[in-house]
Image: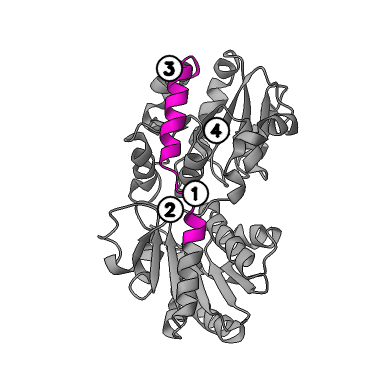
């Protein structure tokens, strides 16, 4: 049997990196002898996270375009040319069977060059509103795996397949891990646990909210696991106490989800997909500072089907504690939200995407 070779690229945030790792893990389980190479952006978090997951990675000298005139923007053409040339060299040396992109600017030059060299490409779009990189790449990509319906206005309809987003397979059936998870985080089994997720880098407005409402939350007999993000950890670690665990990053996401009773989260696409599979009551606080406000669109897709609650950043001061306390005191509402969000899960996404990659290999 031929030894397959795969290049995967996506990065800048966990939302692009973890789907790529999930896809690689699924392919590795099918083809244990396959070779894998990741390509990311130099100085971005993928350069640490991918080797931690056991894969080799090469970095490109590439950045995204800023919305205002900066030195980085002036250097963009130079960096893009350099990254295209380096991508060409990587592809020529590695000779992949398929190149897979999960978004983020690092995947742009690599997939563009793969298309030019006639290598089959697949892109995976996590959001309800695609990023500019995937929109540009979609014209020449062979297959586009999407997580939301009605993306025909962005992508060629004939190439699109609705798969959902790849998620960590250890998140499926977390109920059996609850007792172990409570022990792992040294939690009190008689108290409710609030999990606060701000994304891999953190969310300033969510952190400010938790800081302000910390006493009110604890007064409800609630303990907190507060993932504040690496950018904010030094600022908020002082709140560590018996009932509050402040962390920059969470490695064992299956355990933290298993231990949680209520979750406050941003609405990045990967987070939303994970939360559907986890099936816990969620309050979404979408970031308004992302392209086309796509986090609000991601959250609304769940809220419209009565699977979660949503509070806009602009309404946090007046709404948050009322919404949180009402949810905490209403077990029936918690149960309803859990059941409804779980119905929206697409737990086979990773396997379906791998199936599409295998089709590209077989059709070469």
Colour option used: one colour
Q: Nearer the viewer, mark 2 or mark 4?
A: 2
From the image, state whether disc 3 or disc 2 is nearer to you: 2
In x, y percent, where is residue 146?
39, 58
Residue at image mark 2:
164
Residue carrying label 4: 207
Does the image show residue 337? yes
The mark that comes first in sequence, 2 or 4, is: 2
The residue pinned by badge 1 equals 347
Which of the two labelled residues, at mark 2 and mark 1, occupies the earlier sequence position?
2
Residue at 47%, 21% (x, y): give it: 324
Please provide the residue range marked out in magenta: 328-352
Dominant SS in magenta:
helix
Residue 104 in sight here? no
Q: Is 139 inside the magenta-drawn segment?
A: no
Q: Looking at this view, is 30 or 317 the one in front?
A: 30
Packing grade of label 1 (10 A; few <14, some 14-19, many >=20) is many
Question: Pointer 2 and pointer 1: residues touching (CB < 8 Å)?
Answer: yes
Q: Locate residue 91, reporting x and y percent.
A: 55, 82
Residue corresponding to mark 3: 322
């Amino acid at each position: 049997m031929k030894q397959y070779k795969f290049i995967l690229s996506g990065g800048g945030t966990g939302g692009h990196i973890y789907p790529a790792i999930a896809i690689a893990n699924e392919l590795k389980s099918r083809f244990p002898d396959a070779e894998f190479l990741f390509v990311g952006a130099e100085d971005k978090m993928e350069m640490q996270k991918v080797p931690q997951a056991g894969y080799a990675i090469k970095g490109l000298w590439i950045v995204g375009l800023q919305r205002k005139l900066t030195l980085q923007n002036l250097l963009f053409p130079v960096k893009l040319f350099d990254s295209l040339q380096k991508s060409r060299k990587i592809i020529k040396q590695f000779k992949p069977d398929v190149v897979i992109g999960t978004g983020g600017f690092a995947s742009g030059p690599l997939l563009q060059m793969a298309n030019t060299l006639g290598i089959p490409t697949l892109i995976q779009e996590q959001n309800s509103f695609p990023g500019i990189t995937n929109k540009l790449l979609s014209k020449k990509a062979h297959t586009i795996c999407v997580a939301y319906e009605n993306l025909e206005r962005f992508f060629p309809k004939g190439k699109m397949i609705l798969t959902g987003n790849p998620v960590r397979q250890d998140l499926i059936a977390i109920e059996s891990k609850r007792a172990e998870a409570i022990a792992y985080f040294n939690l009190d089994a008689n108290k409710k646990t609030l999990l606060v997720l701000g994304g891999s880098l953190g969310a300033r407005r969510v952190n400010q909210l938790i800081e302000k409402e910390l006493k009110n939350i604890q007064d409800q007999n609630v303990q907190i696991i507060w993932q504040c993000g690496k950018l904010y950890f030094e600022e908020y670690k002082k709140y560590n106490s018996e009932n509050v665990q402040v962390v920059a990053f969470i490695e064992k996401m299956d355990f933290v989800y298993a231990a949680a009773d209520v979750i406050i989260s941003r609405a990045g696409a990967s987070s939303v997909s994970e939360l559907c599979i986890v099936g816990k009551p969620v309050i979404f606080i979408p970031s308004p500072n992302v392209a086309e406000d796509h986090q609000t669109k991601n959250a609304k897709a769940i809220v419209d089907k009565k699977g979660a609650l949503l509070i806009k950043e602009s309404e946090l001061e007046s709404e948050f504690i009322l919404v949180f306390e009402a949810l905490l005191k209403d077990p029936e509402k918690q149960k309803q939200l859990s059941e409804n969000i779980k119905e929206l899960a697409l737990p086979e996404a990773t396997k379906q995407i791998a199936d599409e990659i295998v089709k590209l290999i077989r059709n070469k």
